[in-house]
Image (spheres, rainbow, N blue to C red):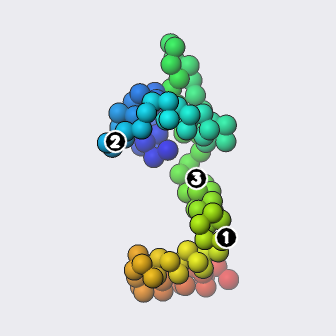
Amino acid sequence: MSILWSNGPLFVREIVDMLPEPRPHFNTIATFLKGLEGKGWVKKEMVGNANRYCAVKDVEPYRENTLKNVISRFFGGSSFNLVSTLTRNESISADELRELIDMIEKKK
């Protein structure tokens, strides 16, 4: 998705060429895009005999949806478990945690 957001409409071959080595197979990317299209995240346009894909939705709803899925699948649906893991792995600093607490308190 980030490639589509950054580069606009692209053909599958162009997307594959932009990915780092080892690149996934063309069919893998085409199948992935078909799934994203079915979920309403991308749309395709037939150009000649190939499909060109573009992002339909903005990055923020995609991030939120992906994060919800990660929290559900890997952290038992608990945001606390996610933050605890980040804290244990030192992926988030005390200052960042304080900033998060401030954001939560301002929402109340």
| Front tag of 3 and 2 | 2
Q: Which mark is residue 77?
A: 1
What secondary structure is marked by label 2? loop
Q: Quadrant of residue 8?
A: top left
Rounded to the nearest angstrom, the CA distance separating label 1 from label 3 is 18 Å
Q: Residue at x 65, y 74 (%)?
A: 78
Residue behind mark 3: 62
Mark 2, residue position: 22
Query: What's under tag 1, amino acid-wise?
Result: Gly
Please tell me which residue lies in front, 62 or 80: 80
Above or below: residue 49 compared with residue 45: above
Q: Is residue 76 left or right of residue 52?
A: right
Q: Which mark is residue 49?
A: none
Q: What crowding class fits label 2: few (fewer than 14 Cα within 10 Å), some (14-19), or many (20 or more)?
A: few
Q: Give the image location of residue 29, x and y in percent.
A: 49, 35
Question: Along the polypeptide, which appears first: circle 3 or circle 2?
Answer: 2
Q: Give the left or right position of residue 21, taking residue 25 as reference.
A: left
- Between 99 and 88, the one lying in front of the other is 88
Q: Is residue 3 above or below residue 50?
A: below
